[in-house]
C-alpha cells in the first residue's frame, strides 16, 4: 500500500501512530496480536517503531471498521490486497455482501425502535413504582412477537 498522504516516511512510536490515526494504543496492539498489523521493529529499548506502511495499513483497517466491516471481513480484504491479485469484482462482491448485512441490521433496528417507542409511550414516568418497560422485560406484559424480538 502507498503511504498515507502527509505522513513522513520517518519511523514513529506507537504513541505518534496512535495520535496520527486516532487509534487507541491498545487497539493497535490488538491488531498486531491478531495479525492485521505486522509486528513492528523495536528500538534497542524495546519500543515499537512503525513506518509509513503501518500507518497506511492501520488507516485502511480503521476506515473499513468505520464502514462496519467485521475484523474477519477486514482480514479478507487485506489478504486480497496483500496478494496483489485482487479484482475490483472480488472487492465489490464483498462490499455488496456487507451492504446486505447492513440492510438486514437496519430492518432489525427499526423493529427495535418500534417496540421501544411503544413501551416508552406507555411509561408514565415520574416516581411511579411500576414501569411498562420493566414489566415487559419481565414478561408481565406481552409484546407482540414482531416487536419483542428483532
Image (spheres, rainbow, N blue to C red):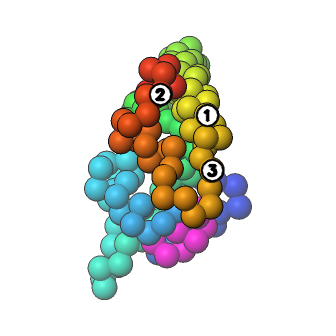
Q: Position of residue 88 (x, y in %)?
A: 58, 19
Q: Nearer the viewer, mark 1 or mark 3?
A: 3
Return the residue nearer the eye: 105 or 38.
Answer: 105
The residue identified by callout 3 is: 124
Asked whether the viewer can see residue 137, the reply is yes
Name the secondary structure under disc 1: helix
Q: Is residue 29 magenta?
A: no
Q: Disc 2 marks which residue?
A: 143
2 or 136, which is in the foreground?
136
Q: Quadrant of residue 68?
A: top right
| Marks 1/3: CA–CA distance | 12 Å
Residue drawn at the location 61% of the way across and 30% of the way down: 114
Q: Is residue 119 left or right of residue 134?
A: right
From the image, which quarter does the N terminus lie in?
Answer: top right
Q: Which residue is mark 1?
A: 118
Relative image position of residue 92 (x, y in whole percent): 57, 19
How many residues crowd around disc 3 within 10 Å: few (fewer than 14), some, or many (20 or more)?
few
Q: Residues within 10 Å of mark 2 (few under 14, many from 20)?
A: some
Give percent across and percent down for residue 133.
49, 44
Label 1 vs 3, first from the N-terminus: 1
What secondary structure is the magenta-colored segment mainly? Answer: helix
Horizontal and vertical percent position of residue 19: 58, 71
Residue 9 in view in this figure: no
- Count how many numbered circles sit on residues in the image: 3
Whether residue 93 is situated above or below residue 126 in the rendered picture: above
Q: Magenta span covers which residues?
A: 14-22
**Whole-number angstrom distance, CA of label 1 to CA of label 2:** 9 Å
Q: Earlier in the sequence, mark 2 or mark 3?
A: 3
- Residue at 71% across / 61% down in the picture? 6
Amino acid at each position: 500500500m502507498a503511504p498515507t498522504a502527509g505522513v513522513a516516511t520517518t519511523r514513529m512510536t506507537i504513541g505518534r501512530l496512535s495520535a496520527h490515526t486516532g487509534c487507541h494504543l491498545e487497539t493497535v496492539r490488538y491488531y498486531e496480536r491478531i495479525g492485521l498489523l505486522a509486528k513492528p521493529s523495536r528500538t534497542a529499548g524495546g519500543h515499537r517503531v512503525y513506518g509509513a506502511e503501518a500507518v497506511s495499513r492501520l488507516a485502511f483497517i480503521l476506515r473499513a471498521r468505520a464502514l462496519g466491516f467485521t475484523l474477519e471481513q477486514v482480514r479478507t480484504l487485506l489478504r486480497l490486497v496483500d496478494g496483489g491479485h485482487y479484482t475490483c469484482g472480488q472487492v465489490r462482491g464483498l462490499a455488496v455482501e456487507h451492504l446486505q448485512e447492513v440492510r438486514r441490521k437496519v430492518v432489525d433496528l427499526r423493529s427495535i425502535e418500534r417496540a421501544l417507542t411503544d413501551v416508552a409511550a406507555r411509561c408514565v414516568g415520574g416516581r411511579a413504582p411500576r414501569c411498562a418497560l420493566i414489566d415487559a422485560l419481565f414478561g408481565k406484559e406481552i409484546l407482540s412477537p414482531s416487536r419483542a424480538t428483532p
